[in-house]
Each structure stands twice: as structure tokens, then as C-alpha cells.
Amino acid sequence: MSVNGDPVEILCETQQTLLDCLRDELYLTGTKEGCSTGDCGACSVTLNGRLVCSCLVLGVEANGCDIQTIEGIGSEESLHPLQKTFLEEAALQCGVCTPGFIVAAKALLDEKTDPSEEEIRYWLAGNLCRCTGYDKIIKAVIKAAKIMREENEQRTNRRAR
């Protein structure tokens, strides 16, 4: 499988979830365990470009797949626009839900560059936050979408020259 663009090989038990494999075998602890039933979204990752709850996917099912976790979105030196706007808009508190929200929001923005507030709320409905409320999170996603569109437009204009 590929995790965050890097090929990896792991041995896992047949009953181990993808979440357990990421955290316990690959030491990628940004993906959080919230409920273990797929209800909270804290463990959100993309699997072959599709948003999934990693607590509901068996590790063996990910064989040959491309997985992206929060660790694959930006870096300390170069934060992704979603990471920047979550900080700027104070869209986080305890941090348990934040990685799942960012992964889910990135999956949305990869698919739709200019989502409405309603579309964002719908897309993120599978992610629960107990601390911040949702308004700051929605503002952060709207702001990141705008930044990403502007960056894309600038790249397109540079190529056209």
C-alpha cells in the first residue's frame, strides 16, 4: 500500500482495523480514535481518494490501496491552507476531531473547489466536535477554499505566460 505517497508494507492481524494499523504499526498517530463505530469522523482518511472512517476498514482491505492521513497534508514548514485557516479561525480546541475535519474538508475541496456553506456542512456532517462548535470550522473551510482557488488561478496564469 501507499501511505501519504510513500510505499509501505505491514503485517497485520486479520481483525486489525486500518486505524489500528496506521497508529500501532506505522506510528501515524494524527488519525484519532473517537468512537470505533464510524459515528464521529475523528479517524477520517482517504482510501484511493474516497473519504472513509478508518475504524470501519480492516487493515487487510487496504492492501494495494493509496491512503492519505493528516500527516500527508502539509508539513511543519509548509502548512496546507486548511491547516492555516483552522489556526487563524481558531477552529480547534482539544484537537481530537481536528485531523478528521481537515482530512474530510480536503477531500471535499479536492472534489469541489467552490462549495457553498450548505455543501460544506453536509460534507462534514459525519465529523463531530464536542469543543468548538461548527461555525469556526465552516469559516475556516470557506477561507481555505478561497485561498486554494486563488493559488490555483495564480499557477494557471504563470503557465499561460
Image: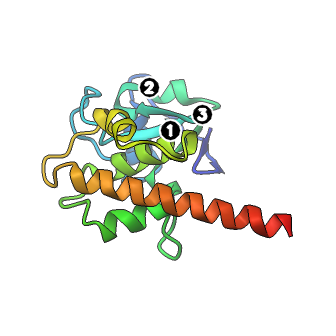
Dot 2: element: loop
Q: Nearer the viewer, mark 1 or mark 2?
A: 1
Q: Name the residue tied to disc 1.
A: 46
Q: 43 or 20: nearer the eye?
A: 43
Q: Position of residue 7 (x, y in %)?
A: 66, 47
Marks 3 and 2, the one that precedes in the sequence: 3
Q: Is residue 91 above or below residue 128?
A: below
Marks 1 and 2, the one that precedes in the sequence: 1
Q: Amino acid at mark 3?
A: Asn
Q: 145 or 27: nearer the eye?
A: 145
Q: Nearer the viewer, mark 3 or mark 2?
A: 3
Mark 3 and mark 2: span between their CA atoms?
15 Å
**Colour scheme in use:** rainbow
Q: Amino acid at mark 1?
A: Thr
Neighbourhood count class around disc 3 (C-alpha, 10 Å): few under 14, some 14–19, many 20 upward: some
Neighbourhood count class around disc 2 (C-alpha, 10 Å): few under 14, some 14–19, many 20 upward: some
Horizontal side, residue 158 vs residue 91: left or right:
right
Q: Is residue 102 above or below residue 119?
A: below
Neighbourhood count class around disc 1 (C-alpha, 10 Å): few under 14, some 14–19, many 20 upward: many
Dot 3: element: loop
Tell me, yes or no, if residue 54 can be seen here: yes
Q: Amino acid at mark 2?
A: Leu
Tag 3 and tag 2, C-beta contact below 8 Å: no
Q: Position of residue 31 (x, y in %)?
A: 36, 48
Q: Position of residue 150 (x, y in %)?
A: 59, 63
Horizontal side, residue 99 vs residue 151: left or right:
left
Q: Position of residue 118 (x, y in %)?
A: 34, 37
Dot 1: element: strand
Q: Name the residue tied to disc 2.
A: 58
Horizontal side, residue 55 vs residue 107: left or right:
left
Circle number at residue 48: 3
Tag 3 and tag 1, C-beta contact below 8 Å: yes
